[in-house]
Image (cartoon, rainbow, N blue to C red):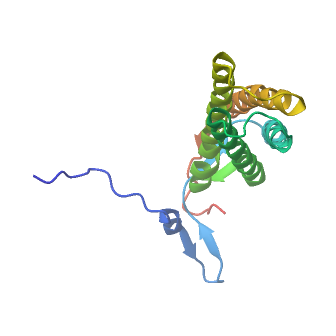
Amino acid sequence: MKKTNDRAPRRKWKHLENFSLQKDGKYTYSGDHMVCELPPDQYRRQCAKMLSVSCAVSALLAAAGCFPQTGMEGNALLLIPYVFSLAAGLLLCCSVFMMKKSGPRLRQYQYEKEVYAVSRRSAEGILGSTAGLAGWLVCIVRHTYPGTGTGSILLRLSFLAGSAGFFFVHRLNSKITWKAEQKQRSGQQNV
């Protein structure tokens, strides 16, 4: 017997159905909007905090990879979490920038793309940095940690700062509450 799926397949460009061509040749969006419950200036400050912390953590992670003798050479317990957390940090910077640029009133598809991405990327960064710290501890216990000097210290600091910074961004993002905007009357249009 063939198994049926109750869910409709997710279409990548489904949000384009909410755009309609007007007589003047311009497109208008008629779909749903999500509105931040914070005042606009406070929303911008929250986004600026998230952006500065995510950029600082990403820069620290990138700098740690530039130093020699970090102990990552041939060490998968450190190299894989490092790459994972650096990629998550860089993508988090892009997501927070787009969220700040779009403002406190987002179209439904922008909300799903940007706000969820910030939450997901910060969680991935926490996971990568924590895995790096755990890998570093495993290497110490097994006496296989060859890293000495500035690069080694900077790598450990970047994993610690990454865990704390990504967690801070995740908490700030969770404090921004969103609600669905009420549809306006038929005589008025959303732009």
- Comparing 142 with 37, the one in front is 142
Which image quarter holds the C terminus? bottom right
Q: Nearer the viewer, residue 120 or 111?
A: 120
Q: Where 41 sits versus 109, above or below?
A: above
Q: Quadrant of residue 153?
A: top right
User: Foreground residue, 121 or 87?
Assistant: 87
Q: Position of residue 175 (x, y in %)?
A: 68, 29
Q: Residue 99 versus residue 155: which sits nearer the camera?
A: 155
Q: Residue at x 75, y 33 (%)?
A: 71
Residue 176 shown left or right of residue 44 in the figure: left
- Is residue 42 visible in the rendered image? The answer is no
Q: Residue 169: give x, y in percent of width and height.
A: 73, 33
Residue plotted at (36% across, 58% down): 9
Q: Position of residue 157 (x, y in %)?
A: 82, 27
Residue found at x 55% / y 73%: 20
Q: Is residue 142 visible?
A: yes
x and y, in percent, of residue 127 in the image = 61, 31
Compared with 88, 123 (above or below) is: above
Q: Work out whether 1 lies above or below 130.
A: below
Q: Can you say whether 187 is above or below 99 in the image?
A: below
Q: How many marks?
A: 0
Q: Residue furthest left?
A: 1
Image side of residue 18 versus residue 117, left or right: left
- In the picture as drawn, the residue positioned furthest to the top comes out as 141
Residue 184, picture quadrant: bottom right
